[in-house]
Amino acid sequence: MKLRVIHETVYQYTPAVQNAQHMAHLRPRTGVVQRVLTHALQIDPAPAQCEATQDVFGNTRAFFSLPFTHERLLVRAETLLETTPPPPAPPGEPWEAVRERLAYRRGMPYHPATEFSFASPYIPRHADFVAYAQASFAPGRPLMEAARDLMARIHADFAYTANATDAGTPALESLRLRRGVCQDFAHVMVGCLRSLGLAARYVSGYLLTAPPPGQPRLVGADASHAWVSVWSPAAGQDGNTPDSAAWWDLDPTNDRAAGEDYVTLAIGRDYADVSPLRGVIHGGDHHVLQVGVTVEPVAATAPVAQSLAPALTPPTAPENPG
């Protein structure tokens, strides 16, 4: 499937900002089931400096600086990419066996997945997560079977409610509220898995949605999305097997596995690692934020746009499959 993603963010500041430094995670990853064809980043006003690098998780991030007075900031990313259906996840080993693989043993090699079994700023390892998850994780149950059951329970038990939480709501608070948005659903599921000693990643991205029957697709009416990636290696999988083969994406907001209609933007421990746009500003006591996201299918015969005009395309960091 060929998709076009446009993510536009506009800040209006009062009074004007004197200077600012920003970081953007707006270039989707290239991996086994997703390939970026073109990407362009437009920033207005034009920054004095813009540089793209890779973070520790393999995400591309763009740093840009605006060391001058400005009342408005526009950041617009447009990406054309191809996606393919991921293979179905096998049931996996019993969840306790996977937990044992991640357990620390002196002198044993460190596995990269272990990084995603620890607590993170928004997601502690906590007994409340264990208590909620236990109904899904019976002794000896295959990990992915248990994870899918946990996903279904979160989908059923939690109400999708806009404005019940915000970007800074901790996962334990989301668990207590039993409501929130995709970020909260993903944080809770990650918290449950990690609190059991398993590895889980927070995934930010986009989902292709269909307009209501008979209605046109509205530009800017979509939104960014979040889901969970679970580390479940196959029996006998060793260090020579690509790590990407052991991660399986589940979406508790929609109670389904991620498919070719999903676009992975960035992966991290929680939302703090993958925020689409964040920064430090001097001035601008008040601001108005507008965000518009468009995800649309592109006909196979459609021409591939090379760039936006006017556009600033920072140097591209090497892609990291996964």
Image (spheres, rainbow, N blue to C red):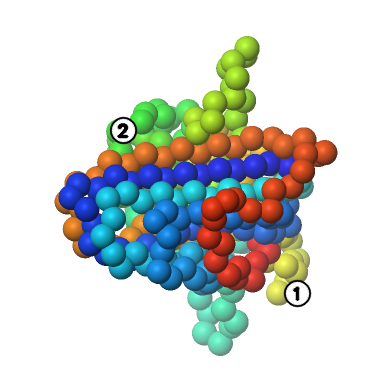
Label of residue 312 in the image = none
Q: CA distance from mark 1 to mark 2?
A: 45 Å
- Tag nearer the camera, 1 or 2: 2
Mark 2 = which residue? Answer: 163
Mark 1 = which residue? Answer: 240
Q: Is residue 49 above or below residue 129?
A: below
Looking at the rendered image, the quarter that the C terminus falls into is bottom right
* SS for dot 1: loop
Looking at the picture, how far across and down is residue 223, in whole percent?
Answer: 48, 37
Furthest residue toward right: 301
Give me the residue at 75% from left, 74% from top. 240
Q: Does residue 265 appear in this view?
A: no
* SS for dot 2: loop
Looking at the rendered image, the quarter that the N terminus falls into is top right
Apparent side of residue 314 relative to residue 297 in the rendered image (left or right):
left
Crowd class of label 2 (few under 14; some 14 to 19; many from 20; radius 10 Å)? few
Apparent side of residue 78 relative to residue 223 in the rendered image (left or right):
right
